[in-house]
């Protein structure tokens, strides 16, 4: 089951987080049953959210590996948004 979620997150982090949220209780446990932060993470920062949830489930999100995973996810989200903005500018210039 875990490998399926990793494949989904690799293909589409939003789809992976949505599957984790609907099919398991991992997202609820990671965010203490709240729904606003996971929804915002699903829309704005899917890589950060998915790696935070996986870090939380694998041990403790405050552990060095959990924090490192969330930071790597944040950099991946920033790169994703920067790449989208760059492609949009190139399309408008042509």
Image: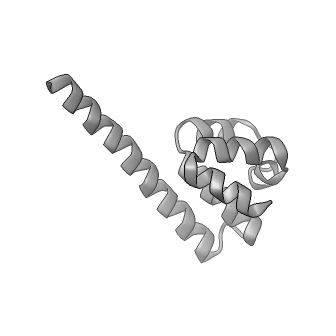
Could you say where residue 76 lies in the image, as x and y percent from the top left?
44, 54
* Residue at image point 60% right, 74% down: 65
Q: Is residue 61 above or below residue 45?
A: below
Q: Nearer the viewer, residue 55 or 83?
A: 83
Query: Residue at left 57%, top 35%?
Result: 43
* Placement of 34 over or under 57, stated as above or below: above
Residue sitting at x 80%, y 41%: 22
Split into 4 quadrants, where in the image is the C terminus? top left
Where residue 70 appears, x then y in whole percent? 55, 61
Closer-to-camera residue (55/92): 92
Q: Is residue 24 above or below residue 94?
A: below
- Between 90 and 48, the one lying in front of the other is 90
Q: Is residue 49 above or below residue 37?
A: below
Q: Quadrant of the rendered structure where residue 90 is?
A: top left
Residue 15: x, y in percent? 64, 41
Residue 82, quarter of picture: top left
């Amino acid at each position: 089951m875990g490998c399926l979620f990793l494949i989904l997150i690799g293909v589409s982090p939003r789809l992976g987080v949505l599957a984790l949220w609907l099919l398991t209780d991992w997202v609820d446990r990671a965010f203490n049953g709240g729904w606003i932060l996971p929804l915002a993470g699903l829309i704005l920062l899917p890589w950060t959210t998915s790696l935070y949830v996986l870090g939380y489930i694998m041990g403790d999100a405050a552990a060095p590996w959990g924090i490192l995973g969330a930071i790597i996810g944040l950099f991946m989200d920033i790169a994703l948004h920067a790449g989208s903005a760059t492609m949009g500018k190139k399309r408008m210039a042509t």
